Amino acid sequence: MENQMALDMNQHVLLPVLQEARNVLMESKGGKEKSSSSSSLQHEAPLGYTVEDIRPNGGIKKFQSAAYSNPSPHRSFSDEVAVLNQFFGSLESGGDAYVIGDSANADRKWHIYYAATKPELPMVTLEMCMTKLNTERALIFFKNSVEGHECPAKAMTKLSGISNIIPEMEICDFDFDPCGYSMNGIHGPSLSTIHVTPEEGFSYASYEAMGFDPLTLVQQDLIERVLRCFDPSEFSLAVTIFGGRRLAGTWTDEILLDGYTCKERVEQDLSGGGLLIYQAFAASSVAAVSPGPTLHY
Ligand SMILES: C[S@@+](CC[C@H](N)C(=O)[O-])C[C@H]1O[C@@H](n2cnc3c(N)ncnc32)[C@H](O)[C@@H]1O
């Protein structure tokens, strides 16, 4: 998870680091608040990042976000792993790093860093990375497309269908100027987050959810609801399971999606008893990508 990963960095850390490696690391570590009494909060940059911008987000302090530049060593995964090991390598599980995906395609790899002090509680986490969004769906995340609505972010949440993904979730959403969208959702122990970059040519949306009951929430239904919001030409997803397959309900199933071809499926055991299932999909008309191995660092 991105923001949610900041929950308890002393206990455990599972960092999915995809194309936006620097952002994920930044958000996982979290900008540390220096003063909560001031109305203009100061943030400390994590892991040597420089704070460039801090935006208020709906007035909810814990959902604030910040943008950072990415100086070395945050330009290569090996360097990132070396830095993370300094922080987390001495935890009971040690620090384990994995790169999963197509080794021939630099844009199609899933980077994972895992470290824990104690066995994980049973938990399923879904992470989706969607690219080449449908142009009309992407337009919803431009502010000028929701002109006239009192709150652009709320309009985007509703018009895109994001509010229907897990309808019970209380959503804190944020619109960027002139385009872009982020939200965090919460319902009991379940958390979710979405970040959308809608610009043509490099459009991208991420969806992540954790803490839900895997025996009642059906994997395929949830994924289909997410896809309806963005209609991407390509996407990959990672399901991380702690607690064993028996408690994971439908979350170990292979998913079959109308209009998409599964290009790759990898199952990777994680230290600490976890299982990661990675799958990559492309809209059925998109040319096939050859599967690649899992590389261990
Ligand atoms: C969803 S936001 C970035 C999400 C990122 N994880 C974060 O919290 O910084 C990305 C989209 O917002 C737009 N955007 C507008 N102003 C921005 C800003 N100050 N910082 C980051 N993105 C901004 C970008 O062009 C892009 O379409």
Image: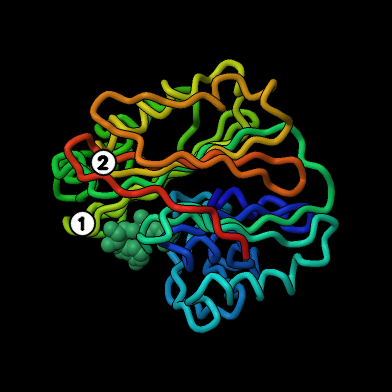
- Residue at the spot x=38%, y=55% of the render? 108
Quadrant holding ligand 1?
Answer: bottom left
* Residue in the image at 75% along x and 41% along y: 273
Labelled pair 2, 1 in contact (Cβ < 8 Å): no
Indicate left or right for 17 with 139 as reference. right
Camera-nearest residue between 82 and 4: 82
Q: Is residue 243 left or right of residue 278?
A: right
Real-space CA distance between mark 2 and mark 1, rounded to the nearest whole angstrom: 13 Å
Q: Give residue 156's position: percent from left, percent from top.
A: 28, 39
Residue 240 image position (x, y, % from top left): 60, 39
Label drawn at residue 107 = none
Query: In the figure, 209 relative to 7: above or below?
Result: above
> Which colouring convention does the figure follow?
rainbow
Say whether mark 1 is within 8 Å of ligand 1. Answer: yes
Crowd around label 1: few <14 · some 14–19 · many ≥20 (10 Å)? some
* Residue 69 placement: quadrant: bottom left
**Does residue 146 appear in the picture of this structure?**
no
Of residues 175 and 88, the one drawn nearer to the viewer in this rendering: 88
What amino acid is at disc 2? Pro
Above or below, comparing residue 50 to residue 149 in the picture: below
Residue on which disc 2 sits: 232
**Secondary structure at numbered mark 2:** loop
Name the residue located 48 percent from the left edge and 68 percent from the top edge: 22
Amino acid on which the number 1 mark rests in the picture: Glu
User: Which residue is tagged 1?
Assistant: 199
Q: Residues within 10 Å of mark 2 (few under 14, many from 20)?
A: many
* First in sequence: mark 2 vs mark 1: 1
Considering every residue shown, the one lying at the far bottom of the view is 72
For mark 1, give the secondary structure: loop
